[in-house]
């Protein structure tokens, strides 16, 4: 890709935008960056770009600059319907995402993971497996370091593992993973997309440029995923915890079995540290990707056995008076909460936060069956109570600390208090990590 002397506009100056601007400038491009925030708010980012000859347009998006560009690189946080982007697209300006830019400079196998839930855990497990197998591996994308930092660093690698969000897939054109995994689909980001199908379509773009020589690792148990998988060009490789597969990877009677081209590997699961039915799916997806890309079975399973839960994903906090407390602050959508509820019985569920626009009704069967008490907080509490409140004992709390205190009073020994919100955190907290820390502190204060 020839960038020297090209007029390139980078839209959005979060971590990804800064990395793109740096990389493009290093390739001799004439770079302009644009962001709606002011100089004071962007002090750290602008310091990183100082002395590189980069033009800045702050507190505005000038349509003329968009239209005069040879190439526009869009940060993941910028919506596709931004009027200036729409105008530029209409006049034929090439618009790409950061992962598209990075992929054009990556010449080793790429494993890409997407899905509504489980992306980060699966990506992290897969990266650890490759490293344990002796591959020089870069792990990044939607977690850790943007992919473009790999292209910028020019480090010698054998393998790239990337977590990829729907936002990052919106502006791809040639992005082609050797192995792409779609873990699951459930309603999310309906504050960004006009409808659920638009969100699904964005996710499915991970497979768009694959051929029959590539692999699509897909969840056989997710009806939506399996339905859409039937039209893919890549070789399908399903995973399932509900059915035996002739080709694929599945769980049955305490054993994960991998079958591919007449070859079979079996991994007993009893000693795996990572608990929860959702993590069984994450482990199978990561294992499938690793083995399809040449990892050795023994080293692969050694990695899986010793892998610990990531922070804020169904993390055990402590036991008080015979009640176990789990923090699942990363569960910001209904699909993620469903997996958490499947992992316990006799639950006091703390949920609520900023409403993301999806329906809460899919939680109804599990709440009826497994949730003894429902304690609701935040902006979404009213709507959640309307949709779910009649299914179990339901209460409201003004703060997360109140919710923990109420839960401690009403949960009998042997029960589980689970904070799994099904909502984002921005109504009451800076982010899901602050929400997690506040929950942990409240539990420790009991």
Image (cartoon, rainbow, N blue to C red):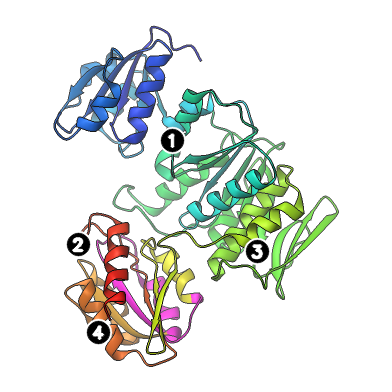
Q: Given the current orientation, which residue lies at the most extreme front position?
A: 445
Mark pair 2, 1: CA separation: 28 Å
Quarter of the picture holding the C terminus:
bottom left
Badge 2 marks a residue whose secondary structure is loop
Q: Residues within 10 Å of mark 4 (few under 14, many from 20)?
A: some
- Is 363 in the magenta? yes
Q: Is residue 265 left or right of residue 4?
A: right
Q: Name which residue lies at 34% across and 52% down.
A: 189
- Which residue is the site of mark 2? 428
Mark pair 4, 2: CA separation: 18 Å
Residue 289 shows up from this direction:
yes
Q: Which mark is residue 406?
A: 4
Quadrant in which residue 331 is drawn: bottom left
Quadrant in which residue 435 is drawn: bottom left
Q: Residues within 10 Å of mark 2 (few under 14, many from 20)?
A: some
Badge 4 marks a residue whose secondary structure is helix
Question: Magenta span covers which residues?
Answer: 342-370
Q: Does 126 sit above or below residue 8?
A: below
Quadrant in which residue 365 is drawn: bottom left
Sequence-wise, which precedes: disc 4 or disc 3? 3
Sequence-wise, which precedes: disc 4 or disc 2? 4
Sequence-wise, which precedes: disc 4 or disc 1? 1
Residue 319 or residue 333, whichever sits in front: 319
Sequence-wise, which precedes: disc 3 or disc 2? 3
Q: Which mark is residue 240?
A: 3
- Which residue is the site of mark 1? 146
Residue 247 or residue 229, whichever sits in front: 247
Q: Does 143 sit above or below residue 325?
A: above
Q: Name which residue lies at 44% across and 63% down.
A: 313
Q: Is residue 185 left or right of residue 296?
A: left
Q: Given the current orientation, which residue lies at the most extreme bottom position?
A: 412
Q: x%, y% of residue 385?
A: 26, 77
């Amino acid at each position: 890709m020839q960038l020297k002397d090209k007029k390139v506009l980078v839209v959005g100056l979060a971590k990804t935008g800064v990395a793109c601007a740096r990389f493009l400038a290093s390739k001799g491009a004439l770079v302009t960056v644009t962001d709606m925030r002011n100089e004071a708010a962007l002090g750290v980012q602008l310091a990183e770009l100082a002395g590189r000859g980069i033009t800045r347009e702050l507190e505005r998006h000038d349509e003329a600059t968009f239209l005069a560009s040879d190439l526009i690189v869009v940060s993941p946080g910028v919506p596709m319907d931004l009027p200036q982007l729409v105008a530029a697209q209409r006049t034929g300006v090439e618009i790409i995402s950061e992962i598209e830019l990075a992929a054009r400079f990556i010449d080793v196998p790429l494993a890409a993971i997407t899905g509504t839930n489980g992306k980060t855990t699966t990506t992290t497990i897969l990266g650890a497996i490759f490293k344990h197998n002796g591959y020089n591996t870069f792990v990044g994308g939607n977690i850790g370091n943007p992919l473009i930092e790999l292209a910028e660093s020019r480090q010698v690698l054998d393998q790239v593992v990337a977590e990829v969000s729907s936002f990052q897939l919106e502006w791809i054109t040639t992005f082609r993973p050797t192995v792409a995994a779609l873990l699951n689909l459930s309603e999310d980001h309906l504050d960004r997309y006009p409808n659920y199908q638009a969100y699904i379509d964005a996710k499915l773009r991970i497979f768009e440029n694959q051929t029959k020589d590539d692999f699509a690792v897909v969840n056989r148990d997710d009806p939506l995923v399996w339905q859409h998988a039937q039209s893919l060009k890549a070789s399908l490789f399903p995973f399932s915890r509900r059915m035996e597969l002739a080709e694929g990877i599945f769980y049955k009677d305490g054993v994960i079995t991998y079958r591919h081209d007449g070859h079979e590997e079996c991994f007993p699961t009893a000693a795996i540290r990572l608990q929860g039915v959702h993590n069984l799916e994450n482990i199978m997806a990561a294992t499938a990707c690793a083995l399809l890309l040449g990892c050795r079975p023994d080293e692969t399973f050694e990695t899986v056995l010793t892998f610990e839960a990531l922070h804020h994903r169904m993390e055990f906090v402590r036991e008080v008076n015979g009640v176990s407390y789990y923090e699942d602050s990363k569960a910001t959508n209904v699909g993620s909460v469903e997996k958490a509820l499947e992992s316990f019985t006799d639950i006091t569920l703390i949920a609520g936060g900023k409403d993301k626009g999806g329906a809460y009704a899919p939680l109804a069967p599990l709440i009826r069956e497994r949730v003894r008490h429902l304690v609701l907080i935040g902006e979404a509490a009213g709507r959640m109570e309307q949709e779910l409140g009649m299914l179990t004992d339901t209460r409201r709390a003004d703060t997360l600390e109140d919710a923990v205190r109420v839960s401690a009073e009403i949960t009998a020994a042997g029960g589980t208090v689970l904070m799994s919100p099904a909502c984002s955190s921005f109504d009451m907290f800076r982010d899901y990590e602050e929400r997690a820390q506040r929950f942990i502190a409240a539990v420790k204060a009991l």
